[in-house]
Amino acid sequence: MDDDQWYSDEAATFGDRLTAAREGAELSQDDLARRLGVKTATLRSWEEDLKEPRANRLATMSGMLGVSLRWLLTGEGVGVAAPTDSTGVPPEAADLVRELRDLRLSMARDTETLERIERRLRSVLGQSE
């Protein structure tokens, strides 16, 4: 895979790029969360693509991590270098990792849909959350 395509939307998620940028800046999740003023669990959910940060946090993160906002969102622009592939990972493993990432994203979307439907149902039934 070309270096400039490694973190593209087709190859990586926002969480992948955030993790790579944080690691490139040599920050732990605790360190970055503290600097951003969020809980470590919140940062972890961003890196795992379970939730998305607000726009003001995105701008702050890009500055702290030395990457462009555009790169964090799409993989295009100023970001971190692609990791070197010295492990000789077989293509089948890369395909499996890609499938796992797609499944994780699908599950996150389904969870959000489920939460939205539950809120609407509670509203219809007159229950508070």
Image (cartoon, grey):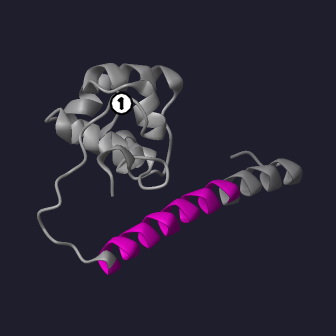
Image location (x, y in percent) of residue 125: 86, 54
Q: Is residue 8 above or below residue 39?
A: below
Exactly how many numbered labels are in the figure?
1
Q: Residues within 10 Å of mark 1 (few under 14, many from 20)?
A: few
Q: Is residue 111 magenta?
A: yes
Indicate the quadrant containing the N terminus: top left, top right, bottom left or bottom right: bottom left
Q: Residue at position x 44%, y 64% from top? A: 101
Image location (x, y in percent) of residue 115: 66, 54
Q: Is residue 34 above or below residue 122?
A: above
The residue under label 1 is 38
Q: Residue at position x 50%, y 45% from top? A: 51
Q: Residue at position x 44%, y 44% from top? A: 14
Q: Is residue 118 visible?
A: yes
Q: Is residue 28 visible?
A: no
Q: Residue at position x 43%, y 47% from top? A: 8
Image location (x, y in percent) of residue 92: 34, 80
Residue that protrudes farthest toward the front in the picture: 2
Image location (x, y in percent) of residue 29: 23, 40
| Kind of residue at badge 1 | Val
Q: Which residues are magenta?
A: 92-113
**Residue 23 position by quadrant:** top left
